């Protein structure tokens, strides 16, 4: 006996036979096939899993467009519709799924959700290319595209290269702004944005300024951590340049560079920042204070001052060390 033929003493028509009956009714033309599919989904959605209802429709010979329209008319979200159509074997490929969802009445965002839910391995670029074909002409600004990709479950590093392909002339700061706003990133997620910029092939030398532009209150520590995560091989000199471009002072930059490069000597670090910050011997005290803040011992700071300022006088040297370390 079929598992659905009897309950509480009353015969039940198997689900697939009900679907076949509705299909035959549709052929007689009092109702459309899409309306017949809707009737089965609407009647059975509270009793049976959606996948079984759609599988019965497919087995009964309902075409993909009619099943999809039935799902739409039954107010099934695009994400669920796409997933169930693929799971039941009603459709296997992204293009017919996207076209069926769009033809059924699903809007762009719901269609995108449905295609991604049904085919989670689909790449972000392939999805965007497909949506441009199906919804032609499709016009999205950079932030709207970022929002769409976030909404369909793609990460920032997955979305960023797509934005770069779609908007190749967009400069780094408006690009970063679109990505940051589209993904609603806060300053604590600065590293995620930096990784996105790296994934989109923006160079290290442009990333620091872009992060500062998006997050005006970012600290030197947050900026350094973000850049190091995205670009794992910057030098102390390169990092100093980015911190300087982002508006951080010598006293803010030097301790963060020391944290990032714990093995860098005081002399090498001093050599990096002297050129970047345009220091002269008259600013030896500023350098000494910064090196002390970076937890270099007096001996190391003294050697660094003499290394970068070989003409420093004894009076200047003593004054700088006294200011940095006290008497």
Image (cartoon, rainbow, N blue to C red):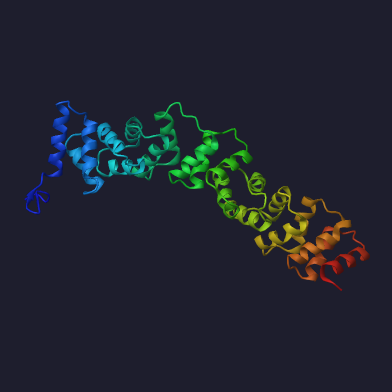
The residue at the point 41 percent across, 29 percent down is 133
- The residue nearer to you, when weighing 314 against 208, is 208
Q: Is residue 75 above or below residue 326?
A: above
Q: Position of residue 176 (x, y in %)?
A: 59, 43
Furthest-bottom residue in this view: 327
Q: Quadrant of residue 327?
A: bottom right
Q: Position of residue 244 (x, y in %)?
A: 74, 50
Q: How many marks?
A: 0
- The residue nearer to you, when weighing 29 against 212, is 29
Left-right relation of 300 to 102: right
The residue at the point 43 percent across, 46 percent down is 153
Left-right relation of 226 to 294: left
Q: Quadrant of residue 289?
A: bottom right
Q: Quadrant of residue 288?
A: bottom right
The residue at the point 77 percent across, 70 percent down is 297
Q: Position of residue 159 (x, y in %)?
A: 50, 43
Q: Position of residue 226 (x, y in %)?
A: 60, 54
Left-right relation of 167 to 130: right
């Amino acid at each position: 006996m079929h598992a659905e033929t009897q309950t509480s003493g009353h015969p039940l028509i198997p689900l697939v036979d009900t679907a076949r009956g509705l299909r035959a009714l549709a052929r007689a033309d009092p109702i459309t096939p899409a309306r017949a599919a809707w009737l089965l989904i609407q009647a059975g959605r509270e009793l049976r899993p959606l996948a079984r209802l759609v599988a019965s429709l497919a087995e009964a010979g309902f075409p993909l467009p009619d099943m999809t329209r039935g799902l739409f008319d039954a107010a099934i979200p695009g994400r669920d519709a796409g997933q169930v159509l693929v799971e039941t074997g009603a459709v296997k490929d992204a293009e017919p799924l996207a076209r069926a969802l769009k033809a059924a009445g699903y809007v762009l965002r719901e269609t995108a959700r449905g295609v991604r839910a049904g085919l989670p391995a689909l790449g972000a670029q392939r999805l965007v290319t497909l949506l441009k074909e199906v919804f032609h002409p499709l016009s999205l600004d950079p932030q709207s595209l970022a929002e769409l990709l976030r909404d369909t479950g793609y990460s920032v590093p997955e979305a960023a290269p797509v934005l770069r392909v779609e908007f190749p002339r967009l400069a780094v700061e408006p690009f970063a702004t679109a990505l940051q706003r589209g993904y609603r990133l806060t300053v604590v997620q600065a590293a995620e944005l930096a990784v996105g910029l790296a994934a989109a092939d923006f160079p290290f030398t442009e990333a620091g300024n872009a992060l500062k532009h998006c997050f005006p209150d970012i600290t030197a520590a947050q900026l350094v951590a973000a850049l190091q995560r995205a670009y794992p091989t910057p030098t102390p000199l390169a990092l100093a340049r980015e911190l300087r471009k982002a508006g951080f002072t010598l006293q803010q930059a030097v301790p963060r560079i020391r944290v990032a490069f714990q093995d860098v000597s005081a002399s090498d670090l001093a050599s990096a920042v002297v050129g970047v910050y345009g220091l002269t011997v008259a600013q030896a005290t500023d350098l000494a204070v910064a090196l002390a803040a970076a937890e270099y011992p007096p001996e190391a700071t003294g050697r660094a001052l003499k290394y970068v300022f070989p003409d420093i006088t004894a009076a200047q040297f003593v004054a700088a060390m006294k200011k940095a370390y006290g008497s």
